[in-house]
Image: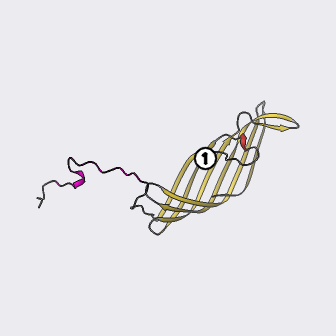
Amino acid sequence: VTPASAPTSSPSTQRGDPPPPPLNTYWSPDAVAHRGLVLRGHVGLSMDVGGGQGSEQLNTGLQVGADLGFQLRLGRRHGIAPELTFCYSSWGFADNTTITVNNVAIPVTGGVTLMSLLAGARYSIYLGRVDLWGAAHFGYGSLGLSLENKNDSSDRADESEDGFAFDL
């Protein structure tokens, strides 16, 4: 019996005992999917992964975005969140970019921007320190192009195209 005024400690914290081992796994038995409002922000690099005509002329760019949704719990570790997502990406042209007009190569500067506002859903599996997820969104997107002649700054073109956009 321990008197009420005597200090108590658990066996793992008594003097001379080694500290508990560090968490060396990304899985936790205590991980739980929560129900409620979800707000995520993301900032990262945006790069061409081998695609359209002239895409090799784009430098790595910046991407920022935000997601707002409401997560519904599907069992202990799973959740689905209907959400809205906003994303802005931009890429600049490489230094050696030229366009050809009337068989004359014109050095240009400028870049490409992409903005989107999409609705969709995100499915998540909560494992502890690492969460797995997949998402699909569909909605509005705007792709903009800005060109300026390096030899004549008054020679400038700005174009944009609005329409359907998606991300997976």
Q: Residue at x 73, y 42 (%)?
A: 146
Horizontal side, residue 93 vs residue 85: left or right: right
- Image location (x, y in percent) of residue 132: 51, 58
Name the residue that disc number 1 marks: 63
Q: Is residue 147 magenta?
A: no
Quadrant the N terminus occupies: bottom left
Res 76 quadrant in image: bottom left
Q: Which residues are magenta?
A: 7-26
In the displayed orientation, state which residue is furthest to the bottom: 75
- Determine crowd level at label 1: few under 14, some 14-19, many 20+ residues with C-alpha closer than 10 A: some
Amino acid type at image mark 1: Gln
- Residue 168: x percent and y percent? 63, 58
Image coordinates for residue 161, horizontal then vertical, percent: 75, 52
**Residue at x 39% of width, y 61% of height:** 29
Q: For this rendering, which residue is in front, 15 or 148?
A: 15
Per the image, label 1 sits on a secondary structure element best described as strand
Q: Nearer the viewer, residue 76 or 81?
A: 76
Q: How many marks?
A: 1
Tell me: residue 126, above or below residue 158: below
Would you say 7 lies left or right of 159 here? Answer: left
Which residue shows up at 66% across the image and 51% down it? Answer: 115
- Magenta-colored segment: predominant secondary structure: loop
The residue at the far top in this view is: 151
Taking 15 as reference, is 116 left or right?
right
Q: Is residue 8 magenta?
A: yes
| Colour convention | secondary structure
Q: Residue at x 83, y 38 (%)?
A: 100
